[in-house]
């Protein structure tokens, strides 16, 4: 336990120390974001085809190395992992009471409602998994959004929280049809089952062909915790009954 | 030796923080080990390669997971007040841990109540999309059992110290354990959540004769834990079609246009109100 605390602290300090690059990062993001907003308006071209906007990718590159490697490397370099050699009676192995109550406590509060006031989106959220073909299960009605329960929950510290909804259903357009018109900076609120609200601000919007969209990259947790909203857009293929594109919105956590 | 184990713990802790590491069930090049104490009424100390690793380890407790260098580790279990591992109550036993594998070592009772230790290998191969894995291990001083899920027998005639497993759709199941061929539960029923891409391992431990049978639970990520979807098909009806050449279904196209106009108007009103 002692060791883990030292390392955690070190990791945090490392992040704090990179403030200059943080603001540069923000500037870059604004510029790129503005350019991209223009692109989106002009017809939603994509940057490199994967569906990850340049601003997001750049933010990831500018940020400190992911803790997985960065944390340990940093500790080794400064030679301080050697609490290893410290005179400790017993190495601490994490121990827990392995019952069902413990399992239940490990569960993060799930999202129940999604609001984007600017777009008039205010809809229920349910949990979804993957279908047998590996694609995301989407709630049948476009009026309800689906949170992918196998990834992070909104409000988490790490990983990507993914929420998707149908753009339409046989009765008409759903709330997510408005997503493609969202502005950078728009506030996105996710209400959790415990009554708390995880607050986000839109940082990037992208429309990408499904032929090239790469969800492994879009949902790569090394980009830092984001809320990612996904729906469909572009031309509708009347024979496959699918749209050609995915509309993808990134939102950054706002600390109240 | 202490160094080796301690360094492994440190690295394991950092990785457990999990910022961005791609979903990997076991750290690259490591072996993952957890330890379960399933002997009732006996608080113990656990020594690994002669070093005290778990102090005052209580029945029903799980230690770990540790990410260890693949090797053979010697584990001895002593009374909680022992000064060293020279007079173990169990062991020493050799645990051979291979690269990229996940293990749980369980101190438990045989069916005849004799204490023993069993090294189980946890199946971390990918579960099918939308499914999780349920593993049940019989480590109790009790006869063979049937394992029930939602009122049906899922595993039949499971005997100590064996395990059975199945991939099932991710959901919460009402699980219960009965003696083989009977239907009255000796453990449960209890709700057991099975998560996508996660191997949920349930242990039946304790002693039937002493009426302290209980469940212990651990979860281990499989290779498909947290897998990204291969695609998101999020539209069904063409109302949001932006195509200009969809000559099929004019009527639907017109309705879609009206729908869009309606939505635009709503959005405009919403905006002007701000």
Image (cartoon, grey):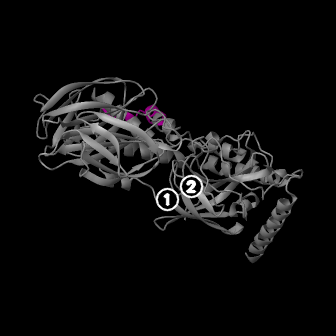
Distance CA(mark 1)–CA(mark 2): 8 Å
Give the residue at mark 2: A147
Q: Residue at x 82, y 64 (%)?
A: B255
- Identify the disc placed on residue B66: none
For label 1, the SS is: loop
Q: Are marks 1 and 2 in contact (CB under 8 Å)?
A: yes
Q: Quadrant of the C terminus of chain B?
A: bottom right
The image position of residue B87, as x and y in percent, is 10, 29
Which residue bears the numbered disc 1?
Answer: A110
The residue at the far bottom in this view is: B273
Label 2 Cα crowd, 10 Å radius (few <14 / some 14-19 / many 20+): many
**Most common SS among magenta residues:** helix
Can residue A80 be seen at all in this image of the molecule? no
Q: Quadrant of residue B207?
A: top left
Give coordinates of residue B118: x percent, y percent.
Answer: 24, 31
User: Is A80 one of the magenta-colored residues?
Assistant: yes
Quadrant for residue B93, please give it. Answer: top left
Q: Which residues are magenta?
A: A73-84
Q: Secondary structure at mark 2?
A: strand
Residue lying at 60% horizontally and 45% vertically, measured from the top left: A219
Left or right position of B176 against A200: left
Query: Within 10 angstroms of label 1, few (less than 14), some, or many (20 or more) residues?
Result: many
Q: Nearer the viewer, residue B50 or B219?
A: B219
Residue placed most toward the observer, A219 or A240 = A240
Q: Residue at x 48, y 41 (%)?
A: B197
**In the picture shown, does residue A179 fall above or below A25?**
below
Query: Is B245 rendered above or below residue B261?
Result: above
């Amino acid at each position: 336990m002692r060791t883990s605390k030292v390392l955690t602290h070190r990791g945090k300090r490392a992040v704090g120390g990179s403030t200059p690059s943080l603001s540069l990062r923000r500037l870059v993001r604004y510029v790129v974001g503005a350019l991209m907003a223009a692109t989106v308006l002009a017809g939603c071209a994509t940057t490199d085809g994967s569906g990850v906007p340049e601003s997001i990718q750049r933010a990831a590159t500018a940020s400190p190395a992911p803790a997985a490697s960065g944390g340990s490397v940093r500790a080794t370099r400064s030679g301080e992992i050697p609490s290893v050699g410290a005179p400790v009676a017993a190495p601490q192995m994490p121990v827990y009471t392995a019952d069902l109550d413990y399992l239940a406590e490990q569960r993060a509060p799930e999202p129940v409602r999604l609001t984007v006031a600017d777009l008039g989106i205010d809809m229920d959220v349910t949990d979804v998994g993957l279908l047998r073909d590996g694609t995301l299960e989407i709630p049948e009605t476009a009026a309800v959004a689906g949170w992918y329960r196998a990834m992070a929950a909104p409000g988490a510290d790490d990983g990507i929280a993914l929420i998707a909804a149908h753009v339409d259903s046989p009765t008409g357009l759903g709330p997510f049809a408005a997503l493609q018109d969202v502005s950078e900076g728009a506030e996105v609120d996710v209400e959790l089952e415990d009554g708390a609200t995880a607050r986000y601000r839109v940082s990037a919007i992208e429309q990408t062909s499904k032929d090239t969209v790469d969800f492994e990259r879009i949902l790569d947790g090394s980009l830092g915790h984001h809320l990612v909203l996904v729906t469909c857009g572009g031309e509708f293929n009347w024979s496959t009954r699918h749209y050609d594109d995915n509309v993808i919105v990134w939102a950054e956590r706002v600390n109240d | 030796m202490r160094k080796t184990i301690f360094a492994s713990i440190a690295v394991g802790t950092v990785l457990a923080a999990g910022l961005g590491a791609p979903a990997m069930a076991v750290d690259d090049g490591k072996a993952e080990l957890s330890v379960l104490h399933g002997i009732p009424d006996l608080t113990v100390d656990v020594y690994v390669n002669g070093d005290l690793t778990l102090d005052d380890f209580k029945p029903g407790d799980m230690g770990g997971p540790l990410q260890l260098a693949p090797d053979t580790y010697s584990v001895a279990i002593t009374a909680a007040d022992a000064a060293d591992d020279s007079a173990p109550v169990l062991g020493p036993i050799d645990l051979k841990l291979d690269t990229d594998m996940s293990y749980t070592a369980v101190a438990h009772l045989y069916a005849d109540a004799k204490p023993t230790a069993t090294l189980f290998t946890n199946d971390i191969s990918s579960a099918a999309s939308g499914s999780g894995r349920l593993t049940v291990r019989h480590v109790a001083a009790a006869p063979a059992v049937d394992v029930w899920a939602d009122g049906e027998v899922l595993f039949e005639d499971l005997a100590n110290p064996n395990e059975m497993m199945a991939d099932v759709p991710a959901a919460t199941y009402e699980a219960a354990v009965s003696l083989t061929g009977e239907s009255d539960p000796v453990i449960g029923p209890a709700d057991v959540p099975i998560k996508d891409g996660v191997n949920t391992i349930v242990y039946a431990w304790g002693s039937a004769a002493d009426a302290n049978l209980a469940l212990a639970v651990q979860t281990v990520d499989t290779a498909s834990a947290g897998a990204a979807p291969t695609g998101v098909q999020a539209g069904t009806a063409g109302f949001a079609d932006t195509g200009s050449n969809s000559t099929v279904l004019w009527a639907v196209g017109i309705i879609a246009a009206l729908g869009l106009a309606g939505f635009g108007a709503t959005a405009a009103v919403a905006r002007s109100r701000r």
